[in-house]
Amino acid sequence: MSLTVLVIIIAVVVVLIACAVAASMVSMRRRKLQERFGPEYERTVAEQDGHRAAEQELRDRQERHDALDIKPLPAAARDRYAQDWGRVQEQFVDRPDDAVHDADRLVTTLMSERGYPTEGYEQQLKDLSVEHGETLEHYRAAHDINERSSRHQATTEELRGAMVHYRALFEELLHNGDRPGRSAA
């Protein structure tokens, strides 16, 4: 075997190894994003022009989120919010539309106190997706029902569902991202 053939074989092997390493790194980054964002990963892929654009969007969200001053709530604030939530739930019996609107406001206030910007619903979704991707569908569903309720187009059963959806995100935000009964990571 000539030296030229040997050099070509070595070059091809090196290129193949480099391609395998690059593919492995892409796969690992993708897996990390999928784990971090949960169902939001697939939703973003579906909304964007493929994986590359979606993954860049998710990395941008993560970068913005990392720059935020997200802070845990002190115990006294958690107790106050828990009492506020109890009052909102109690009002559902007599005024379900108002209860859902109040639940939305309470979740937004809680987000703000934790350090999340609340300048718009779409941005809220993006900011929440970094740490709360598993409960984001609850927030979307609740928000949709709340919007329909504002136009008097939601049934009482849908409003009840909105309260359940809001509670899922509320509980996660209330307990600093850790669901009750689950140890912090």
Image (cartoon, rainbow, N blue to C red):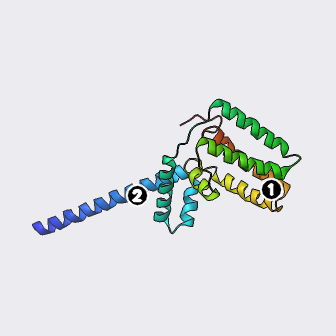
Residue 51 locus on image (x, y percent): 48, 64
Callout 1 amino acid = Glu
**x 51%, y 54%: residue:** 61
Residue at the spot of label 2: 26
Q: Quadrant for residue 73, please give it.
A: top right
Q: Quadrant for residue 155, please give it.
A: bottom right
- Farthest residue, direction front: 119
Mark 1 Cα-neighbour bin, 10 Å: few <14, some 14–19, many ≥20:
some
Callout 2 amino acid = Val
Q: Which of marks 2 and 1 is nearer the N terminus?
A: 2
Asked whether the beta carbons under mark 2 and mark 1 sit within 8 Å of each other, the answer is no
Secondary element under disc 1, as helix, strand or loop, is helix
- Foreground disc of the pair 2, 1: 1
**x 29%, y 59%: residue:** 17
Secondary element under disc 2, as helix, strand or loop, is helix
**x 75%, y 40%: residue:** 85
Residue at the spot of label 1: 158
- Farthest residue, direction right: 94
Q: Estimate the spatial distance between the alpha carbons at disc 2 and disc 1, rounded to whole Å.
A: 42 Å
